[in-house]
Structure formats: structure tokens, C-alpha cells
Amino acid sequence: MNAAGNYNTPVEDAPLGDPVNEDNKEMEHLQDSKVTEMTFTQWELVAKDVITVAFNYLLSMCLIIYQIIRSNNTFSLDSDNMVAFITTVSCFGYGFILPTVIYIHSTRNLSGDSALKGVYSWTEWLPIIKNFLQIPVSLKHACVVTILMWAGFVVISFLVLITTLTTKSIVDGADAADEIRNVCDEKNAQQCGTIIFSNCIALFHLFCLTGEMLRYYVLNKTAM
């Protein structure tokens, strides 16, 4: 009671929000927004595998192109290695254009899941030979495209081997078998191991790239 004889009515303090709960809610909101921003579609994930393998293939082809330009310890192109240079650059373009088209398509692909998604998943346990194991699936659901893609693999492999392991152009009438047998002669012994190893790496990545591109095509074709 105050001096005037009136009773003071206690004033209740305004409820304060729990700062801990508010901080937690803010953190959850930020985490949810980050997850939303970093979410990829299933097609972009498959295309990511294609791009990764294509990058490895392109790096190995760059090494081969470098060896062609660097022949005879000089950075030059003459009539003997111009055909090899043009051929390997064309093979480089093959590994750049098709994966780029697939990635662009994946960003606009709104198809649903494929019934073959589970069929392909078990091959992930065998990463070295998974693309070989996927060939029967591709042949069953996309026979023509599968034959064309693997035929392209054979042709590109042949071109890379012939143009890098021979010292003369086949167009000039050189015997490819004799040239390949002599690739490791005394004159080329220093570069022999590097050339053969580079070719093996490039062709292996080309093999994987062919399989990954076919996997994307088949999954997209059979999508619901």
C-alpha cells in the first residue's frame, strides 16, 4: 500500500523467448536451406559419374597429345606426326562433347526413377569391371545404341593405338604390324614405356566412359 492508501498492483514482466530454442531453430533453418541448395537430382548424380570419367580420359589424352607435339625433343608438328595430332585431338573432342551434352540434358531431365536402377546398383561393388557387366543390360534395353557406342570405342581405340604406336601414317602405305613391333626399338626405347602406359590409361578411361554414357542413356530410356 502506498501513501495514498492504494494497493500497488504488481506488474508482470513480459515473457521472454528462450534464446537457446531460438538459436536452435535458426541453425535448423540454415541447415535446411543448405541441404536444399546442395541437393542434386538423380540424373545429375549419374551425369556426375560421366563427367568424372570423361575428365580422367581427357587428361590422359592431353598427355598423349603432349607426347606427339614433344617428339624429337622439340615442340613442333611436321608431316610425320600431323596425322597423329589431328586424330588424337578428334578423339579428345569425342570425350568432351558427348559428356557435356549428357550433363546439360541431366540438368533439364524431369523423368522419374528407372526400373533398372536396382539392376545397375549391384555392379557398383565391382568398380573395375562394372561397365563390362552392364553390357548385357544395355544390349537388352538399347541394342542399337549399345552396338554403336561400343563400335565407337573400338574405332577410337584403334585410331589412338595406330597413330601413337606407329612412326608413319597408314595412309602412306606403312605396315602397321611392323611399325608397332618396332615401337620399342633402340631409337624409341626412352619413350616406349611412357607411350604404352599412356595408351593403356586412355583406353581404360574410354572404356569406362562408354559404359557410363550407356548407363545414363538406358536409365533415361526406361525411366517412368
Image (cartoon, helix red, strand yellow):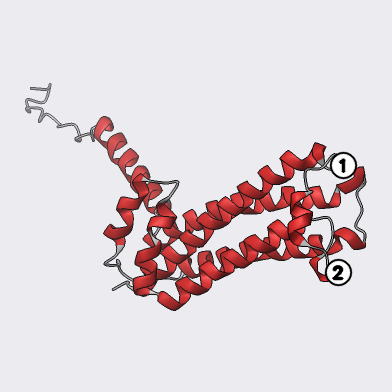
Residue type, numbered disc 1: Lys
Q: Which mark is residue 187?
A: 1
Spot occupied by residue 200 in the image (x, y as percentages of width and height): 62, 48
| Residue 130: x %, y % from top left | 40, 52
Q: Are marks 2 and 1 in contact (CB under 8 Å)?
A: no
Callout 2 secondary element:
helix
Give residue 95's quadrant in the image: bottom right
Q: Is residue 216 left or right of residue 32?
A: right
In this orientation, which residue lies closer to the viewer: 95 or 164? Answer: 164
Q: Residues within 10 Å of mark 1 (few under 14, many from 20)?
A: few
Mark yes or no: residue 96 visible.
Answer: no
Residue 72: x and y in percent read 91, 46
As measured in the structure, the alpha-carbon distance from the residue carrying label 2 to the one carrying label 1 is 21 Å
The number of numbered badges drawn on the structure is 2
Kindly tell me whether residue 127 is visible in this rendering: yes
The quadrant the N terminus occupies is top left
Q: Is residue 144 left or right of residue 77?
A: left
Q: Amino acid at mark 2?
A: Asp
Give the residue at x 29% y 64%.
Answer: 116
Q: Is residue 6 left or right of residue 45?
A: left
Where 90 sits versus 207, above or below? below
Could you classify mark 2 by the number of other residues whose Cα lies within 10 Å: few (under 14), some (14-19), or many (20 or more)? few
Q: Nearer the viewer, residue 182 or 191?
A: 182
SS for dot 1: loop
Front one among 18 and 72: 72
| Quadrant (top left, top right, bottom left, bottom right) of the C terminus | bottom left
Relative to 191, say whether 47 is above or below: below
The residue labelled by disc 2 is 172
Residue at 10% in and 31% down:
9
